[in-house]
Image (cartoon, helix red, strand yellow):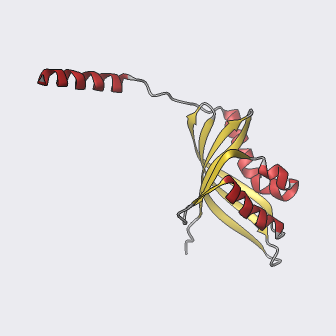
Amino acid sequence: MKNIYVVLIVITLFFGCSQKEEVYKISEKDQKEIEALKKSIPLVLANQGWEAYEKLFSKNYQNWHMPGNQIRNREDYLSAVKQWYDAGNRATDSEVETIAFIPLSPHKVMYLHKQVEKFNLAENENQTSRDIRFISIFVKEENEWKVDFTAFMDAPKTN
């Protein structure tokens, strides 16, 4: 009886280890589209308005501001951004520095990047900026890249 267990373990290990893990790739064209989309997101809101901005996010979008412990769904995240936007705040510039693309499936990519966004805030006349670190997941819906998930935190202040 003991030998049957050994045989079953060997067979399980053999088949478990012999299966190839699928390796996905992302084309240079898709990389450029995702980089351009990520850079443009704050500016789309400022220049094209709410409806154009809202369409950039997948139907299952989620967001995590990493210092917190709560993941917001699409509706909660967009509601918070809408309040900020309706208060008169606008982005004026956006720069993105790519760290890595990690394909998760044929139409889903994790994108690690740094982003500096500049804003004119309604409550004062000074321009402000944020240096942010992002982990984003982009998904292709209806042949267009959409933001499916973002986790972000402000870059640590160094003195």
Splitting the image into 4 quarters, where does residue 47 fall?
A: bottom right
Q: Quadrant of residue 21?
A: top left
The answer to whether residue 120 is left or right of residue 138 is right
Image quarter where the C terminus lies is bottom right
Residue at horizontal 71 percent and vertical 68 percent from the top = 129
- Name the residue located 62 percent from the left edge and 55 percent from the top edge: 63
- Name the spot of residue 134 as percent of width and height, x first: 60, 55
Residue in view at x 27 percent, y 21 percent: 11
Up/down of 123 relative to 113, above or below? below
Between 131 and 61, which is closer to the camera in this rendering? 61
Farthest residue to the right: give it: 48
Q: Is residue 80 above or below residue 136?
A: below
The percent coordinates of residue 83 (x first, y second) are: 77, 66
Q: Indicate the quadrant containing the N terminus: top left, top right, bottom left or bottom right.
A: top left
The residue that appears at 65% across and 52% down in the rendered structure is 97
Q: Residue furthest front?
A: 1
Quadrant hosting residue 151: bottom right
Residue at far left of view: 2
- Number of numbered discs overlaid on the protein picture: 0
